[in-house]
Image: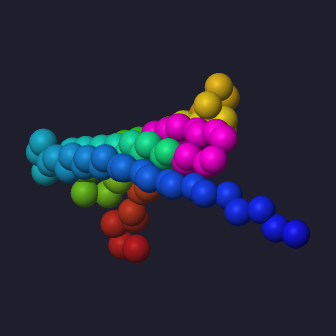
């Protein structure tokens, strides 16, 4: 014995990206994504959103030094009344030896 459930789903996404180079020693990158998801079933429907953004900064203060900073943020709807956020950050500092 089986019961059919009729449903429709749709989604849309927006993405933007910015890449800049202010000087020879400074680069900045930023990326943002937003999504909206709709699921309609016979007796219910849900609207869920997700959002993410990422930033990156590269600094080269001298020939031997390289500094890279990154940060990422994610926000996802688990249910229409509950969301989860996640923040990640990273820093790299590199020194290149003159003879290496």
- Report the magenta residues as a range: 39-51
**In the visual, does 17 lie left or right of 71?**
left
Q: Residue furthest right?
A: 1
Judged from this view, the residue extending furthest toward the left is: 23
Which residue does the image show at 21% across and 46% down from the upper left?
18
Question: Measuring 50% from the left and 54% from the top, which residue is drawn there?
Answer: 9
Taking 57 as reference, is 88 left or right? right
Q: Nearer the viewer, residue 21 or 88?
A: 88
* Residue drawn at x 36%, y 49% as measured from the top left: 13
* Magenta-colored stretch includes residue 42: yes
Considering the image in quadrants, where does the N terminus appear?
bottom right
Of 51 and 17, nearer the camera is: 51
Pinpoint residue 38: horizontal percent, then vertical percent: 50, 45
Res. 22 in view: yes
Residue 51 against residue 11 in the figure, above or below: above
Indicate the quadrant containing the C terminus: top left, top right, bottom left or bottom right: bottom left
- Report if residue 88 lies within the magenta region: no
Residue 30 percent coordinates (x, y) = 30, 44
* Outermost residue, front side: 1
Q: Position of residue 93 (x, y in %)?
A: 45, 49
Q: Is the stretch drawn in magenta largely helix, strand or loop?
A: strand
Residue 65 as seen in the image, left or right of residue 27 = right
Residue 91 visible in the current orientation: no
Please provide percent x and percent y for residue 33.
Answer: 37, 46
Q: As drawn, is 25 to the left or to the right of 39? A: left
Residue in the image at 65% along x and 25% along y: 81
Counting labels gives 0
Q: How is the image coloured?
A: rainbow
Q: Nearer the viewer, residue 68 or 19?
A: 19
Quarter of the image where one finds residue 43? top right
**Rendering quarter of residue 55:** top left
- The residue at the far bottom in this view is 100
């Amino acid at each position: 014995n089986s019961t059919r459930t009729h449903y429709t789903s749709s989604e849309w996404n927006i993405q933007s990206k910015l890449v800049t180079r202010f000087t020879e020693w400074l680069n900045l990158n930023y990326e943002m994504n937003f999504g909206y998801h709709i699921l309609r079933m016979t007796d219910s429907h849900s609207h869920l959103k997700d959002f993410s953004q990422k930033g990156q900064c590269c600094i080269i203060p001298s020939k031997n030094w390289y500094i890279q900073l990154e940060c990422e943020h994610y926000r996802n709807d688990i249910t229409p009344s509950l969301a989860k956020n996640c923040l990640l950050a990273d820093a790299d500092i590199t020194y290149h030896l003159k003879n290496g």
